[in-house]
Image (cartoon, helix red, strand yellow):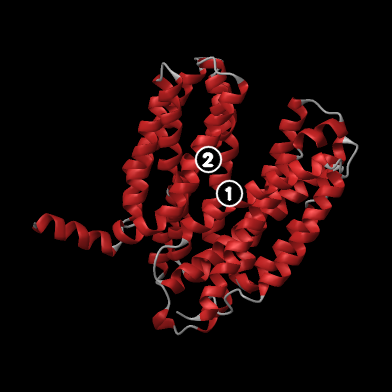
Amino acid sequence: MDHSLRAARVATFVYFILCGALMGTWVVYIPAVEERVDISHATLGGFLVLLGLGAFIGMQVAGRLTDRLGARVVVPVTGVLCSAALVLPGLPREPWMLAGALLVFGFCNGSLDVSMNAHAVHVEKAYGRPVMSAFHATFSVGGVFAAVVGAATAGAGLSPAVAMAAVGALGIVIALVSARALLPAAPTAADTDVVPQAERTPATERRGAGGRIWLLAALALMVMLCEGAANDWSALHLKDILGASASTAAFAYGTFAATMTIGRLLADRLAARFGPMAILRHGAATAAVGITLVALAPWMGAAFAGWALFGLGLSGCVPQLFSAAGHADPAAAGANVSRVAGLGYVGMLAGPAVIGWLTHLVPLNQTFLLLTLLCVIAAVAAGVLRTGADRTREMSASSH
């Protein structure tokens, strides 16, 4: 295999780790920043919406820029900007300044997220086999790095601003050093201007592909809503519904996150063998079984098993959706990924709020049945990922 392609894959891993580490560093220092600015949990919740809004806008802008300029230009630029912006939330002492800082940091983080995913699509296409899930697994590795660094810097007595500036400075160096290994020849929208008319995708096919992209985006919203709900409510479920101690309850999210990471490390090989449609269909069905078990579990052992199944099932779903969006039209990979990622991000942010609202009507564990429904819908709609290889497998199976 070409050495430059291997280097591009390694560089993509590095950018995913960087993105996870930058966001994870902010998450680690949320309590310290909240105390420094002296705001309530409710006010902080409103500010986090601004972070999400900034990320959504950044995704749309960066998606189009990636298609126009190429991922090799946009990825390192957004990596540098996101690293530099990390220090901003650690500086303010006034609420309005924190709100602006989170809006800017969210914009930069969303820009990096989409551009690196668009480059990951090009790497996957060059490899000729699924590699997207492993990239998403390394995003979690970045979060672990952030937790370790956060604990060390907090123990050393460093202020949030100093610690976040140090991580950001390291991020700038990493983003610049890794840039040279990115693929130089990813197709861009500008390239399509010189493609012969006979080789261009017909307008009717592009319109059909557009409808498919929005269906992929709707599925991403459902799946990532489930993921967001697990992030914020898994520990509280064990504590409030099953009476677990705070330390035991924390392992609920740990279980979910661990099986999700393991699943993403395995999903590429499974997708290569069985196809992305099978990963989404069986993964979403497994997640539905897992979260239903959580909702109905009368004891902690069953709840832990349910959260483990939920994480394992969801693990490969989002990477398949991102990959399908990017491959739908190589010259518009950035814009298509931005639509799927953007709507998915809305779901990630909305999940905790939706569950919280439903707790006013029914007990927390019963609200999880909504997640069961969303997983079932995703499993039923998995045919949107059907490929020619899937049709061949189905014909072969029916002939036997």
Q: Are circles 1 and 2 on residues that touch, CB within 8 Å?
A: yes
Location of residue 22 in the rendering, given as x and y in whole percent from the top left corner = 71, 51
Amino acid at pointer 1: Ser
Q: CA distance from mark 1 to mark 2?
A: 8 Å
Q: Identify the residue shown where x is 46% and y is 21%.
A: 300
Location of residue 392 in the rendering, given as x and y in whole percent from the top left corner = 21, 63
Viewport quadrant of the C terminus: bottom left
Q: Is residue 297 left or right of residue 70?
A: left
Place residue 250 in its image quadrant.
top right
Q: Secondary structure at mark 1?
A: helix
Location of residue 347 in the rendering, given as x and y in whole percent from the top left corner = 54, 40
Place residue 48 in its image quadrant.
top right
Place residue 209 in its image quadrant.
bottom left
Q: Is residue 185 left or right of residue 290?
A: right
> Residue 140: which numbered mark, if any?
1
> Residue 257: which numbered mark, if any?
2
Q: Is residue 335 left or right of residue 180?
A: left
Q: Identify the residue shown where x is 41% and y is 58%.
A: 268
